[in-house]
Image (cartoon, rainbow, N blue to C red):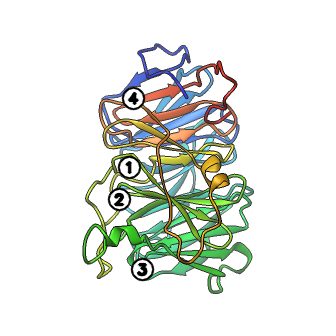
Amino acid sequence: MANPPVSGHGSGTPGQIILDENIMAWLTFDDFGDFLLTASEDETFRLYNAKTGKHVKTLASKKYGVDLPRFTHKNTTIVYASTKEDDTIRYHSLHDNKYLQYFRGHKKKVISLDVSPVDDGFMSSSLDNTVRLWDLRSPQCRGLLNLPAPPVVAYDSTGVVFAVAVNQYSRILLYDMSNFDKDPFKTIHLDDVRLAKISYPPRIPVMTSMSFSTNGKWLLVGTAGEVHYVLDAFDGDLLCRLEGHLGLERGKTGNSLGVVPDRGISGEEVCWTPDSRFVVSGSQTGKIHVWDVAKFLERQPPLTPQSEVPTLNASLSLDGHPGASRCVKFNPRNCMMATAGAELAFWLPEASTDGSKQPGN
């Protein structure tokens, strides 16, 4: 994958590290992989040239706070949630450092935000138990879903389908964008029978993120605990469990009564590589773990109702950060990865001497 990080000074070399006095909680690449934006707990966000690793500018949102920043389809604009004053989502120009639009409607903290991969739409979810659909061109909400508990949201790679995870019932609901006001066309129950062997009543996985593979085959469900999950994106079958990392919120689980904690620091630490082959995750220990999911699933026989869901252990673990590796993002166009916690690290692949495939290649 890459060499362990070593100190660097803006050269873009493998393992370059950029130190920050505050914990970096969010990372986002633009569509072309040219820029990386970080958001820190000091209510600032920093823009980096992803090709050179050089810092471009620092902006602040001290009055409203900054959370869940996402690039739009322009590398000069982002949307992000507020953490103070109100629960407004803000459309911000990085070039002019001004707000272009305000999206009001949520009554409590926004906990999930995703931009459509195909148009100017985006969606958000909140502790007010709603999902709202938006368009960058209008301040008015264009769609509203009321849920029984705070949800987590994600678009599929085509922008035609979106997923809504509800921890209270361990359900993932799949909606058609053209019929979002109708019932979900698919309801998936995330049932990990192995957790019942650990404690009684069985623990409930706390889902903190979801992402579809770019090939459209699989849905990655990230949790706050020691297991991430890969599901079949079409029929919803649980295909494998991913273990080897230490959950960012170790010990945080729901219970059989549906009592699920609010969002914490988990949610940005696990992702697919752009080729849909590998899953990469951070860990409470600071290590970066890699699973060769595609290769594993290709070799697995079809699951039957009696089959036990297989567990895949990390095939590679890298020395990442001295503290928790809270953010892991792969560049969508170039073979490089960024990870962050108390510091930002850029990773490049080692040259392969045996012809084997490296993550992201």
Kindly indicate the quadrant of the structure image that contains residue 225: bottom left
Upstream in sequence: badge 4 or badge 1: 1
How many residues crowd mark 4 within 10 Å: few (<14), some (14–19), many (20+)? few
Upstream in sequence: badge 2 or badge 1: 1
Nearest the viewer among 87 and 18 is 18
Q: Amino acid at mark 4?
A: Asp
Q: Amino acid at mark 1?
A: Gly
Residue shown at 67%/53% (left/top)?
298
Q: Give the mark toward the camera: 4 or 1.
A: 4
Question: What residue is shown with label 4?
Answer: 319
Residue lying furthest bottom in this view? Answer: 183
Question: What residue is shown with label 1?
Answer: 65
Question: What residue is shown with label 2?
Answer: 85
Q: Amino acid at mark 2?
A: Glu
> In this orientation, does residue 87 appear?
no
Q: Secondary structure at mark 2?
A: loop
Distance from Cα at disc 4 to Cα at disc 1: 31 Å
Upstream in sequence: badge 4 or badge 3: 3
Q: Give the mark toward the camera: 3 or 2.
A: 3
Q: Give the mark toward the camera: 4 or 3.
A: 4
Distance from Cα at disc 1 to Cα at disc 3: 31 Å
Q: Secondary structure at mark 1?
A: loop
Q: Secondary structure at mark 3?
A: helix
Question: What residue is shown with label 3?
Answer: 169
Side of 337 relative to 19 (left or right): right
